[in-house]
Image (spheres, helix red, strand yellow):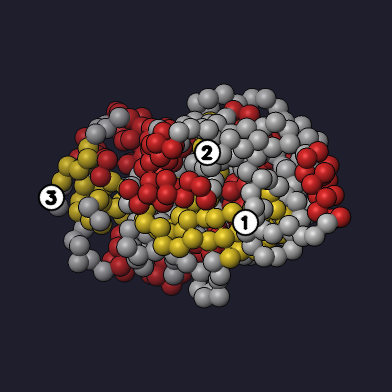
Amino acid sequence: MKFKEISLNLLELNVGQIEGLPGNPRKISAEKLELLKKDIQDYPELLEMRGLIVYPHNEKFVLIGGNMRYRAMLELGYDTAPCIVVSKDASVEKLKAYTILDNAPFGEWDWEALSNDWDEASLIDWGLTMPEFEKEETKESAEDDDFDEAKDVIETRCQTGDLWLLGEHRLLCGDSTKKNDVARLMDGERASLWITDPPYNVAVTNSKGMTIANDNMSASDFYRFLEFAFASASSFLVDGCPFYVWFASKEHINFETALNAVGLIVRQELIWNKNAFILGRSHYQWKHEPCLYGWKGDVCKYFTNSRNQSTVISDELELNIDKMKKEQMRDLLKEILSDKMPTSVIDENKPLKDEDHPTMKPVRLFGYLIANSSQNNDIVLDNFGGSGTTLIACEQLGRKARLIEIDPHYCDVIIARWEKYTGKTAEKI
């Protein structure tokens, strides 16, 4: 069999980007990965005897066999790898067989991924017997947690550059505009969904005086900031990856132009219809937030089978007077005693509660979008982690969140929130 030396930059893990081929169900522990790295260092000639099995796809090569060696070579600083290139004409069934039969001794089977995504009869034909276990029922919706920064203990422990493991999720205290930071977070993986809530460039502050980094720039500087952040994210999305990007109406042009500039084509605008408006000086009080929806490439990788999803998303929020600003309470009283104020969406209105982050979104809102555009065990990227709404929704829905947050305090909030919700302890890695 003839090997071809291929740059590691052109290789990508199989995360389901090839139509009909489920993501690779192999995984490896940190201990066994270190053993594999040592073996490669001691006997590098073994790499020449057993090349990685790859399949050409969209100007790159998807790993069909050799995931563990690929990860080890990345960490050891290799630039290229000897590869066996499968014919572009190979059937999906043949690719599935190669994936299972190329069974390296250092890896372990992700039985949950196998049971969810792979045909058991074919696995038996290939000599793999599934263990008996009960499948967990996949949740279809997420609910808000009861985390309250004012009452819950938040330990100060995060510093810039820290990488944390939170169960199946990863959190980096870093800069989403830096591709190297995103690469460190993703660790050779690619996301099947991108959902994020970047700064709106409106200098927002909540009732606790909390602000957001990069939220008060000139229009041109803000555009460059967005383009860098979006380009960094795009590099780690599978082809067809859907995305949801929240934005402020006054910066619509910057957001959509920056997305399109990096190959992320906006297809629709969604509206979150709150039942609580933001009090301000506008003629029509802001009672909604817009979100840009689209996907990378020509064909969307996944969307729910349901065809009754609307571009207007209603979400009721509980009135919380304790977390309102004095000005909000005063204006609320004026509203109650006078006629209704006109809003950008004609509906019932209540003042929006102020939570642990100036632009915090409800978990059930993000959960609704995540459930629509991803599947169990999918990797979900959020490169503006905020207070961790994406992570909590992923925890409930069986997805794997990958978050970057630039502010160490908000990283502390995310960790404390996850630890309270799960009862587990985050691990710094």
Identity of the amino acid at label 2?
Answer: Asn
Could you say whether the residue bearing mark 1 is in a helix, strand or loop? strand
Could you say whether the residue bearing mark 2 is in a helix, strand or loop? loop
Could you say whether the residue bearing mark 3 is in a helix, strand or loop? loop
Q: Where is residue 364 in the image (x, y as percent from the top left)?
A: 66, 57
Marks 1/3: CA–CA distance: 59 Å
Marks 1/2: CA–CA distance: 17 Å
Marks 3/2: CA–CA distance: 54 Å
Q: Earlier in the sequence, mark 1 or mark 2?
A: 2
Q: Is residue 338 visible?
A: yes
At a point 65% along the width and 39% down the height, the residue shown is 358
Q: Which of marks 1 and 3 is nearer the N terminus?
A: 3
Q: Which of marks 3 and 2 is nearer the N terminus?
A: 3
- Label for residue 288? 1
Identity of the amino acid at label 1?
Answer: His
Q: Mark 3 points at which residue?
A: 2
Q: Where is residue 80 in the image (x, y as percent from the top left)?
A: 22, 37
